[in-house]
Amino acid sequence: MMKFVKERAWLVLIFLAASALVYFIHYLIFRDVHHIFIYMIGDLGFLFLDVMLVVIVIEQLLVQREKKMRLHKVNMLIGTFFSQVGNSLLGILVPLFENSSQLREKTSFNQSWQRKDFARAKKEISSLSVKIKASPENLAQLREFLLPQRGFLISLLSNPSLLEHESFTDLLWAIFHLADELSLRPDEMSDLPQADLAHLNNDINRVATLVLTAWVDYVAHLQENYPFLFSLVARINPFLPAAKAIVS
């Protein structure tokens, strides 16, 4: 703080000297000290209102603008995640849900959905008990898909823009943990004990719950801001029996 003051002391002195010079010139021309002090006191009184306007109003507007920009960057990262990993991961997980019919009802979104519909869907999905039962073959499929994605997941986790988005960061860590667990299993997983299968299924359940809620938020964002991207996501919705990108 002292260094900051010392470095700018000369600037303060220049401004004070310039102000004093202007007042002195005013006195030389008009010879009216009374008039000078009237306006000086009036200006000092307005200074507090000026500071209030800058600090409270303008600063708040700048904070909101910065927050909006950070949120936009985060949504871009989340969109990249779903394009690279999330959509394909959901496609693998959906057949494993034991209550997929319930989840299908909550995620049958379309162009008529509004923000409140997505909020309701997210709340209902969070209240459901996600049930997944993955076989050794399913585990092998997940491992084959997730292991090549670890570099991409690390790059997302290292992005400072995600520091304020705890739920999405939790999702990335959950996926990364599942990939690590699967990488430490033998190539042939048919002989895994039931306790270990239950442990891995618990890890998959954690990923499934987090990715579903993040997916609903992501789709809501697309519906509100990028209708053309929302159209594609709605067509390839993995919960739809006949999901396809081709427009018919």
Image: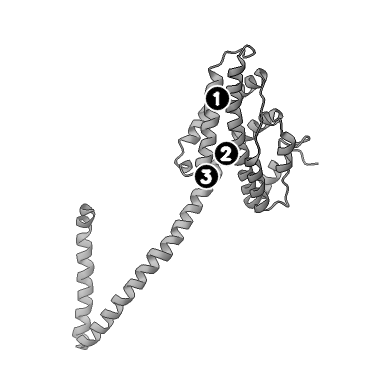
Vertical position of residue 59 compared to residue 124: above or below: below
Q: Nearer the viewer, residue 188 or 3?
A: 188
Residue that label 1 marks = 179
Give the mark toward the camera: 2 or 1. Answer: 1
Instruction: Say if 201 sits above or below 33 in the image.
Output: above
Q: Dot 2: what SS?
A: helix
* Residue 60 x/y as whole percent: 44, 61
Where is residue 145 drawn, in percent x and y? 61, 25
Q: Are marks 1 and 3 in contact (CB under 8 Å)?
A: no
| Front residue of 45 and 35 | 45
Question: In whole angstroms, how far apart are the C-alphas of marks 1 and 3?
Answer: 23 Å
Residue 219 drawn at (x, y percent): 64, 45
Quadrant in the rendering for residue 204: top right
Dot placed on the residue nearer the N-terminal end, 1 or 3: 3
Find the distance from the CA under tag 2 to the CA under tag 3.
10 Å
Lateral position of residue 223 relative to residue 8, left or right: right
Mark 1 residue type: Ala
Write the residue at 64% across / 48% down: 220
- Around disc 3, counting alpha carbons within 10 Å, would you say few (fewer than 14), some (14 to 19), or many (20 or more)? many
Q: Position of residue 98 (x, y in %)?
A: 71, 30
Is 203 displayed left or right of 105 in the figure?
A: left
Please give the residue where the numbered disc 2 appears in the rendered image.
Answer: 80
Answer with left or right where residue 60 lies relative to residue 235.
left
Determine contact: label 2, label 3, CB under 8 Å: no
**From the viewer's perspective, is the residue at label 1 or at label 3 nearer?**
1
Please state, as top left, top right, bottom left or bottom right, where the C terminus lies in the image: top right
Residue carrying label 3: 74
**Earlier residue among tags 2 and 3:** 3
